[in-house]
Amino acid sequence: MATTADTASGSQSVRVTLWILLIVYIFNFIDRQIVNILAEPIARDLDLSDTQIGLMTGLAFALFYTVLGLPIARYADRPGTNRPRLIAVALGLWSLMTAMCGLAQNFVQLLLARIGVGVGEAGCTPPAHSLISDMVQPEKRASALAFYSLGIPVGTLLGMIIGGTLADFVGWREAFLIVGLPGVVLALVVWFVLKDPRRSDAAAILRAKNPAPALPLRQALAEVMGSRAFVLLLCAGSSAAFLSYGKTTWTTIFFQRTHDLSPGQVGLWFGLLGGVAGILGTWGGGYLADRFGAKSWRHVLSAPAIGMTIAVPLAILAYQAPSWPLALALLFLPTVFNSLYYGPTYSAAQGLVPLRARAIAAAALLFFQNLIGLGLGPLFFGMLSDWLQPTYGEESVRYVLYGAALLGLIPAFFFWRCSLHLDAELDRQG
């Protein structure tokens, strides 16, 4: 029977783990998103087209990130894998490759460095989600994963502000170097401080006559894709990510081209607004999912479905605004509403699969979200902007963003459809 001291020690261990993983995820998104605020000065320096900007900010990173995510998740699901050390190695690698972006002399070199960032970051979230889901109770899972997901808006905020400020004062090359190298130090902290709860049971697993092996990859994927709710969740999360990544990249460029702001100004104001709104939305989404999901599982996804629908007209008004302060103010609420889905989505994904397939579930969701979202979102909108430029000139980005806002109805629809299956499928494995 657990003593009060054991319970307190366990709670402290969970809090320490969650805070360190949050900091790691913040670094993850700083290194991932800093390229967005630096895209315009990079494009001017290296003479890149909008399509090349989309390729650099999206597909080059996402292709390797997604392809490597599944085998890394398979490794993370093995009972003997030390997940914190896997995360530490990944963090060290992507931090070094971020710094290498600052040394690139042409488009190909920059593309290869971005690929390296994607390779490293593939080893972060699947084992982190698996670790968190093993350490917290199911009824608190959405809030815990939402807390971890705060790394997205906080990292994006810091990446925008730090990247934009450094670009204005020391240049985009130095910005990559300054931002990338501290992650190597953090990797050492993760390696020596975090513990995997499975490791304490390693001896018992080895002594057991029939230890439970990790599911074969094909069987794990079959378990994951056998859930109709999970398939709908993939559609919802992927379409939401497609719009989120695409709009983030091109909204930063929109404020520079249409409203004549410098990278530092956009990084400060858009980064601050987007970061605060994203934090409120991410935390609020987890809170609403836990509160209303306790009454009925289907309400775990009600807030994202409703929020993304309301966000559509508000975002269109923001992109129509004649001045940048008004545009920023009008973007606040749509950003909050569009951020509600992080915690509920990852929480539902973890509850729709067996325990031994949780990292695979996270990797499958990330595979589609990042290949379709991060990989194709910025690239598609960049190609569309190039196509519209002969007609609209530098205003082409504004018209691209009109379409992106209207497409927000697609993920809202899929979140609603998925919610109808949650009462029957969520946490059916206990």
Image (tube, rainbow, N blue to C red):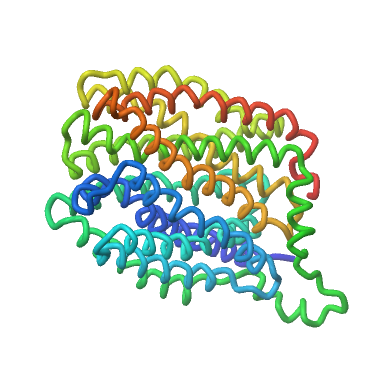
Does the image show residue 44?
Answer: yes
Query: Seen from this angle, which residue lies furthest front?
Result: 390
Q: Quadrant of residue 70?
A: bottom right
Looking at the picture, does residue 1 appear above or below residue 409? below
Q: Which quadrant of the rendered structure holds the N terminus?
A: bottom right
Residue at left 78%, top 39%? Answer: 425
Residue 308, horizontal then vertical, whole percent: 51, 26
Residue 253, horizontal then vertical, whole percent: 27, 37
Residue at left 48%, top 75%? Answer: 191
Residue 216, horizontal then vertical, whole percent: 77, 65
Query: Seen from this angle, which residue lies furthest right?
Result: 209
Residue 137, horizontal then vertical, whole percent: 66, 51
Does the image show residue 295?
Answer: no
In depth, the one of 72 and 7 nearer the eye is: 72
Q: Is residue 385 left or right of residue 9?
A: left
In depth, the one of 89 and 348 nearer the eye is: 89
Residue at left 48%, top 20%? Answer: 310
Looking at the picture, does residue 247 appear above or below residue 305? below
In depth, the one of 306 and 101 nearer the eye is: 101
Q: Is residue 232 left or right of residue 378?
A: right
Residue at left 66%, top 34%? Answer: 293
